[in-house]
Image (spheres, grey):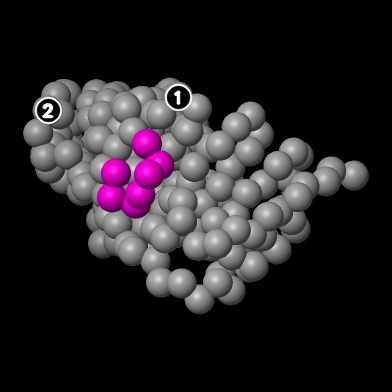
């Protein structure tokens, strides 16, 4: 049976150590919300320039990225050691990270103007392919003082469900966890680099 320990610190910071079970994570998150302290909210941005790729007449649906705890939340994640993560004190994203990243991906494709149409599944257009992704890392690494973003992406044909292409994208930029403003800015820069690569790659497939 896997075991984990959740410590609740001041400022709603949560730490997980060891092998983490889903139940332990859920309990830690629930306890983190009981501190009563207000959190400053930060948003990410979609790059508007520096995106180069091949134009395509395809229409693409961008699904919400898959994410496991602790990334599937509004909180900004900090890696404090091997197998050890925490929530940044006093800071959060404006919405759940997967939902926020889905919006940033769509806006990045729209800004690049390389596809005929792009949107969420179920919107009023017929997509030939979908972009499915997973958040593998989206955190500040305290030991290396870096913001790290790692996203795996797959392009799936809507007609057959076949994976057309797949790739892992990652970026690292200098960044510390001293406060929400610095951490969010560093993660935003790392995300922008990652999104430029994802858009150029996805637009050039097929």
- The residue carrying mark 2 is 50
The residue shown at (64%, 59%) is: 8
Q: Which comes sooner in the sequence, label 1 or label 2?
A: 2
The residue shown at (75%, 58%) is: 23
**SS label for mark 2:** loop
The residue shown at (45%, 24%) is: 144
Horizontal side, residue 172 vs residue 200: left or right: right
Residue 105, position in %: x, y? 29, 44
Quadrant in which the N terminus appears: top right
Above or below, 117 against 203 in this view is below
Query: Which residue is at the far right?
Result: 1
Q: Is residue 158 visible?
A: no
The 10 Å Cα crowd at callout 1, few under 14, some 14 to 19, many 20 or more, is few
Q: Is residue 17 visible?
A: yes
- Marks 1, 2: nearer the viewer: 1
Residue 145, position in %: x, y? 41, 29
Horizontal side, residue 130 vs residue 5: left or right: left
170 and 3: which one is in front? 3
* Residue 80 is covered by the magenta coloring: no
Above or below, 169 against 76 in this view is above
Residue 194, position in %: x, y? 31, 30
Quadrant in which the C terminus appears: top left
The label number, if any, that marks residue 136 in the structure image: none
The label number, if any, that marks residue 144 in the structure image: 1
User: Which region shows up in magenta?
Assistant: 176-182
The residue shown at (14%, 24%) is: 52
* Residue 181 is covered by the magenta coloring: yes
């Amino acid at each position: 049976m896997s075991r984990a320990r959740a410590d609740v610190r001041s400022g709603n910071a949560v730490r997980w150590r060891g092998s983490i079970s889903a139940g332990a994570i859920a309990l830690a998150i629930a306890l983190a919300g009981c501190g009563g302290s207000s959190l400053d909210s930060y948003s990410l941005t979609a790059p508007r320039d520096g995106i180069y790729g091949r134009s395509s007449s395809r229409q693409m649906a961008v699904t919400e990225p898959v994410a496991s705890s602790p990334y599937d939340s509004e909180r900004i994640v900090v890696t404090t050691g091997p197998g050890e993560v925490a929530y940044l004190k006093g800071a959060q994203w404006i919405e759940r990270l997967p939902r926020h990243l889905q919006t940033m991906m769509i806006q990045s494709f729209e800004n690049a103007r390389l596809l005929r149409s792009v949107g969420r599944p179920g919107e009023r257009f017929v997509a030939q392919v979908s972009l499915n992704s997973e958040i593998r890392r989206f955190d500040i690494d305290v030991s290396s003082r870096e913001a790290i973003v790692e996203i795996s992406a797959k392009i799936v044909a809507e007609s057959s469900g076949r994976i057309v292409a797949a790739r892992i994208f990652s970026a690292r930029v200098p960044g510390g966890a001293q406060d929400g403003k610095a951490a969010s800015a560093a993660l935003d820069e790392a995300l922008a680099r990652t999104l430029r690569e994802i858009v150029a790659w996805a637009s050039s497939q097929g």
